[in-house]
Structure formats: structure tokens, C-alpha cells
Image: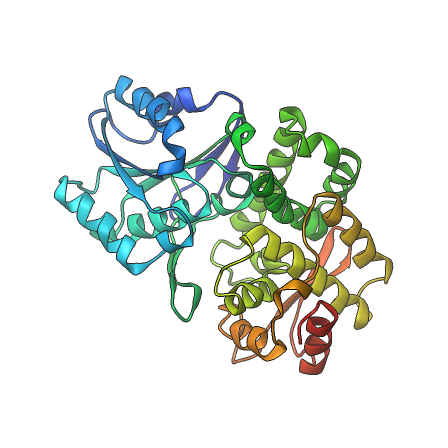
Amino acid sequence: MKTIQVKSLKGNYKICVGQGLLSKTGALVAGIFKPGVKLMIVSQKKLAPYLKTIAASLSKKGFQVYSHTLPDGEIAKSGAELFRLSYDLLAKGFERRDGIVAVGGGVVSDLSGFAASVYLRGIRYVNIATTLLAQVDSAIGGKTAIDLKEGKNLMGAFWPPALVLSDVNVLCSLPQRELCASMGEVVKYGVIGDPALFNFLEKNFKRILRKDLGAIEKVVLACAKIKAGVVSRDEFETKGERAILNFGHTFAHGIEGALSYKGLVHGEAVAIGMMMAAQLAADLGFCSQELPWRQMKLLVSMKLPVSIKKFNLKTVAILKAMMTDKKKNKGILHFVLPRKIGKVTLEKDIPLESVRKILRLAGAK
């Protein structure tokens, strides 16, 4: 097991990465919660095979273990589910010394973390990441949220976990599409801050796609280190650095919104969004013409989509959804654009016609 330290003004925490960590959950959590406290495992039905191991490990260390099941999919990130979990915690007598153990991907950690931030004005929670996307990105950094009908992640809080556990063994059971979709965020980390990671992905994508745990563990560690460093330096996204983690996301959230969050999973939307951002950067002269082609080749090798042609989306619908993006400032969209592999910058005042052109090139009408 390897550990990465994350600094937070609300309490430093560790990311633990390795194989066979689920059975060690109790011992690792014992360093955070006192024996005998109540812990609510929040998860989804499809993750039931892991819950028995986790619950047994926690019970062995003397914790009172309860469980709460969320519906599958993005629908779990709703106000209704936030209140349902809050009332469940209240009904079972959870106090401030007690906590939540979120087991799952980004949907589970987002909802659980937000519930932890507001229940009794804040209790601690642990993220046990069961998807590659969660292990490299969403479980780290303390961004929690629910969706509103007007857009994604519009209500939330910065509330860091007390611990993140990433057992790469669980990734063996990931459906192939989900594994590939997660690689969208992995490629992102190579573009924004790690040329060596990008090179590793180019040379080892076949190992990753066949779920070689040695290769996957290297990827998780590399991405987790980058994100830990960024959020430690700019936890609340006030200094500008944390914004680089949104590479491709402004376009991606616009696509997801225009599709009503159907037809694409998040990592696939991010892959398309990164292609749009890279092409926009090349068109504006911020990077070489070769960069978007190199990025596209890697994304395609990871079996990720790079256009929206098949969705028959209108440019105006995507732009409308993009304008709900939290990262706009005074009504102006900001874009994270690559300068070279390993370096990106945050840009504003991008001509709207340039954005429209990119959307049309990607297949919008």
C-alpha cells in the first residue's frame, strides 16, 4: 500500500492506494473514528459484493455499522436523495462523532460528502472509491454536490473526506465501457501536468484495457499525486490553479446538459470536451496543430468517443447548457486550454464564434 498526503484547511487526510485494501478498511478507519461510533455505509445495489467485506472489517474493529442504498445512476445526486439519507442518519441517532463511509464512484461520494457537510453542520466521511474515475479524480479534493434540474453540481460544498481508500483490485469487475470512460479523466491528467504519464498511456494502453493491475496502479498513483498537489495548493479554487482540473469539462457539461445526461457517461463526455478544447487551442494558436491529433489518437486507442455527430445536437442547446457552468465569471465562460502536453492555461474572452466553430466541427448543428 502507498499513501499520498493531501493538505486541507479543514483537516489533512491520506489517500491509500494498493491491492486488497477492502479487508483492511476497519484498521485504516480506526485511525480516524473512535471504537464504538456509528458508521453509515452509503452505496448502491450493484456494489453489494464489496459491502460484506467492508462491513465485516468495520464490525471487527468495534464500529456500529449501518447501510443506506442509493439508486443507481446520476439520479442519486438529487435533493430528494440528500434528504432521504439525512433522515436515515437522524432516525438511527447519528451524532457529530459518527460518520459516513461512501462506497462507490463519483455519484456516491458527491452525495455522501454533501450530506456529511450539512448533517449536524458537518460530520466526517470516508471515500472508498470503486471506479477508476473515482480513484483518480472524484474521490479526492472534497468537492461535493447534488444536481439541480437546471444543471449538474449546482448545489454543493467543499468538504474534504477524512480518508480515501483506492483498492485497485475492485477495478477488475468494472465493465469495459466504464473502464474506458474513466480513462478520459486519466488522459486529462497527462495533458494538464504530466508528460511522462501521457507517454506511459500511449505505450501501455493495451495493458490498461486488459486490466493489468500493475499498470492501473501506476496510473492511479500518478493521477492521485497530481490532484493531491493541486488541491493542496488551491483547495477552494480561489487561486486559479485548481481550475486546470476542469480541462475539457466546460464543453463536456454543455454536451451532457444538452443530452439531458443520457447517451454518454461522464468520462466519455470529458473525452469529447478535451478534443474540443484542444482543437480550440490549436485554432487560436495556443498550441501546435499536432497536439489535438496526438490527443485524439490516444483517446481513440482507449475506445473513447471524440465527436458528437451521432447525437444530432444543436449548437445553441450546447451553448445554453454551457452557460450554466459554475466556472463562468461575470457571465463569461473560462476555458482550460493546452499549450503543450503537460501544460495548460485558463483563458477567458474566447470569441463566441470560435466556440461555435468548434462545436460544429465536432458534429453539432
Residue 338 % position (x, y): 74, 60
Residue 94 visible in the displayed image:
yes
Q: Is 117 drawn above or below residue 281 in the view shown?
A: above
Residue 336 % position (x, y): 65, 63
Q: Quadrant of the C terminus?
A: bottom right
Type of colouring: rainbow
Q: Nearer the viewer, residue 241 or 98?
A: 98
**Who's the residue at 54% across and 34% down the image?**
174
**Who's the residue at 46% across and 42% down the image?**
105
**Who's the residue at 70% across and 64% down the image?**
276
Quarter location, residue 200: top right
Residue 67 % position (x, y): 26, 35
The number of numbered badges drawn on the structure is: 0
Tell me if 206 is positioned left or right of 137 in this view: right
Tell me if 210 is positioned left or right of 178 in this view: right
Residue 9 visible in the displayed image:
no
Tell me if 318 is positioned left or right of 304 in this view: left
Q: Nearer the viewer, residue 189 or 272?
A: 272
Residue 328 % position (x, y): 53, 73
Tell me if 340 is positioned left or right of 330 in this view: right
Quarter location, residue 96: top left
Q: Is 238 drawn above or below residue 134 in the view shown?
A: below
Q: Is 67 drawn above or below residue 259 in the view shown?
A: above
